[in-house]
Image (cartoon, helix red, strand yellow):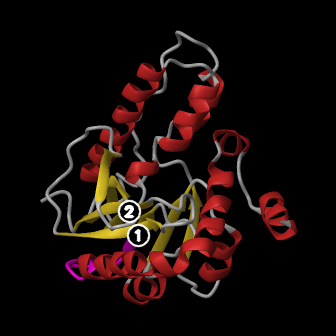
Amino acid sequence: MILELAEYLLTPCSGAFRRVGYLQGQLGIKVRYRQCGYAWQRHLDRTKAAIIKAFGGCSQYRKAVILGSGRLLDVPLRDLALAFREVILVDAVHPLNAYALAAWYRNVRLVRADVTETADELVQIAGQPGKPLPHAVPQRFCDDPEIDFVASVNLLSQLAYLPGIYLEKGERPDAEVEEWSKSLLSAHLDYLRRLPGVVSLVTDVEKMVIDTKGRVTERIDILHGIAIPKPDDEWVWNHVPLGLLSPEYAYDRRVFFIANVKI
């Protein structure tokens, strides 16, 4: 508990990002990984292997951008650093361990940014009912011709999650939050298609409720109904093992890998 508090206080994070919950979310991932690391390992390994396979299709190796780098659990940082002249890790909050790992590589740079480019405006208007929510049209990196590879890593389904909770606290109607969440995810897919280079996507698309006999009892679309490209590969992520949250149910996630969203 003391270590988590120290990390909360010491982790660089803007006021807006703290209010939306991005810092608390990163610390939550740390706790959940400590609880579920063994169950997550296959998913993390598959994600790393998919990214390595995807950047193998690049014609040049100047800059690589990883969107949603987080704790780097699912990012093959060493492989990227050896392959590219520069690696740019992007997240709203970089945990302290990410700074430590990145420090081993002279060509790795961390950028603190909200990839939707809406958070700052969101905190200003969230509690003002009737005022339109920010429209996401991200532009960062779109004009950099030296970027040869981009990967959005286990980020898409999470883009609207914490902002949605924040909006609900501001008493925004559920229907408005749902429509805005859908637009946020659609804007990210459009953004990926506008970025230079080979652009890969790893995302969970469906949450599955699993009973004690291993049967799927419920399927939940976690992408708000948006359509995404046909995957080049897919797998199941054992997200919450049986007994962690319930003695009767486990929660798995179906994960898609698209090697290049622009094809």
Q: Is residue 148 visible?
A: no
Q: Position of residue 15 (x, y in %)?
A: 73, 42
Marks 2/1: CA distance?
A: 5 Å
Mark 1 residue element? strand
> Which stretch appears magenta?
55-64
**Which quadrant holds the N terminus?**
bottom right
Task: Name the magenta segment's main secondary structure.
Answer: loop
Q: Position of residue 195 (x, y in %)?
A: 30, 55
Q: Position of residue 41 (x, y in %)?
A: 45, 81
Q: Is residue 167 above or below residue 85?
A: above
Q: Amino acid at mark 1?
A: Asn
- The verdict on residue 116 being magenta is no
Q: In the displayed structure, does residue 110 sit left or right of residue 148?
A: right
Q: In the displayed structure, does residue 8 sit left or right of residue 73?
A: right
Q: Residues within 10 Å of mark 2 (few under 14, many from 20)?
A: many
**For residue 31, which numbered disc appears in the image?**
none
Residue ID for mark 1 = 238
Q: Is residue 47 visible?
A: yes
Q: Amino acid at mark 2?
A: Asp
Residue ID for mark 2 = 252
For the point 57% across and 35% down, which residue is it?
165
